[in-house]
Image (cartoon, rainbow, N blue to C red):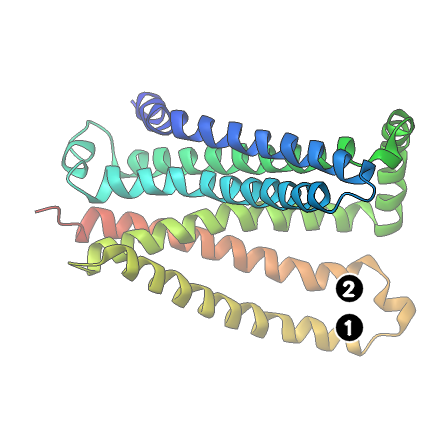
């Protein structure tokens, strides 16, 4: 039943999500074409102004549509769980865990699709829009992976793995924090639930920033007491990153279980 619910959640957003992705990709193509026109203009102030305007419009449209993809699934989560549609959703033969996880996975899918589309659009704009790269793109691609390997060797593969883990856990946790804010706003506020959710979100992030800052004081003290050669060691980077990873993971798990408790015990759709 979880799979069916997830399919239903994704079908509810795929149309708008697909349209936003097309707008995002189209904006990248527009910016790419405008950049090539801009570099070839000489002495025509009007065309120069229009080309600059087109580049700015393409970049702005790309950013707005990319950000909008993140809100589509979150809006569906709110509408399908905490409005009149919630009556139907919570009477389905699924557990509250499955209900929350379906919405969460749907949000993650939307997030991944949105980020991938934005990256492809920006790369399209820059990689094909800059004329100085003509004739060099193939060689750049051939040298890309060896360059990345050299950077990772310099940075350290273990450090890179910890950084990647922190970024992934951070993204997964951020989605849970947003969903928790929506849940708290919907449960506690009778009116203006979205405004309440925004206030709760900022309150949670203020608390997270405080905890992260306090958790980083001890590792920073350790780093300050080391010599430059010791500070360059991977163990120092681990001392900085591991607490951040564990705290972020704890916040994500805490957000999920608190959300489950509120949905199970405190939600009143009457």
- The residue that mark 2 highlights is 236
Image location (x, y in percent) of residue 21: 51, 30
Q: Residue at x 42, y 53 (%)?
A: 177
Q: Is residue 144 above or below residue 44?
A: above
Q: Quadrant of residue 215?
A: bottom right
User: In the image, is 249 to the left or to the right of 45?
Assistant: left
User: In the image, is 218 to the left or to the right of 1?
Assistant: right
Image location (x, y in percent) of residue 161: 72, 45
Between 269 and 262, the residue placed more toward the observer is 269
How far, Cα to Cα, is label 2 from label 1?
Answer: 7 Å
Residue 223, labelled with which disc? 1
Residue 249, labelled with which disc? none
Image location (x, y in percent) of residue 44: 77, 43
Q: Residue at x 39, y 25 (%)?
A: 15
Q: Residue at x 83, y 41 (%)?
A: 42
Query: How dense is the environment of label 1, judged by Cα within 10 Å: few (below 14), some, or many (20 and up)?
Result: some
Task: Give the farthest residue toward the left.
Answer: 270
Q: Are marks 2 and 1 in contact (CB under 8 Å)?
A: yes
């Amino acid at each position: 039943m979880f799979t069916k619910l997830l399919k239903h959640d994704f079908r509810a957003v795929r149309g708008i999500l697909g349209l936003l992705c097309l707008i995002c990709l189209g904006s990248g193509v527009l910016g790419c074409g405008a950049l090539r026109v801009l570099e070839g203009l000489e002495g025509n102030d009007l065309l120069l102004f229009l080309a600059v305007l087109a580049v700015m419009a393409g970049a702005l449209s790309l950013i707005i549509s990319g950000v909008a993809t993140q809100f589509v699934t979150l809006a569906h989560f709110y509408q399908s769980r905490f409005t009149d549609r919630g009556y139907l959703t919570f009477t389905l033969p699924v557990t509250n865990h499955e209900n929350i996880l379906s919405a969460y996975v749907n949000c993650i899918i939307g997030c991944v699709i949105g980020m991938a589309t934005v990256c492809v659009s920006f790369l399209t704009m820059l990689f094909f829009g800059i004329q100085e790269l003509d004739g060099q793109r193939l060689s750049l691609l051939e040298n890309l992976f060896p360059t990345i390997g050299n950077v990772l060797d310099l940075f350290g593969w273990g450090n890179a793995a910890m950084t990647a883990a922190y970024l992934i856990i951070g993204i997964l946790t951020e989605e849970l924090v947003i969903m928790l804010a929506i849940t708290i706003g919907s449960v506690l506020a009778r009116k203006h639930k979205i405004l309440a959710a925004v206030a709760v979100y900022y309150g949670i992030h203020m608390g997270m920033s405080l905890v992260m800052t306090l958790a980083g004081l001890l590792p920073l003290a350790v780093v300050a007491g080391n010599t430059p050669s010791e500070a360059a060691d991977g163990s120092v980077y681990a001392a900085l990153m591991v607490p951040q990873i564990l705290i972020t993971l704890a916040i994500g798990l805490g957000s999920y279980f608190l959300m489950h408790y509120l949905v199970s015990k405190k939600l009143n759709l009457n």
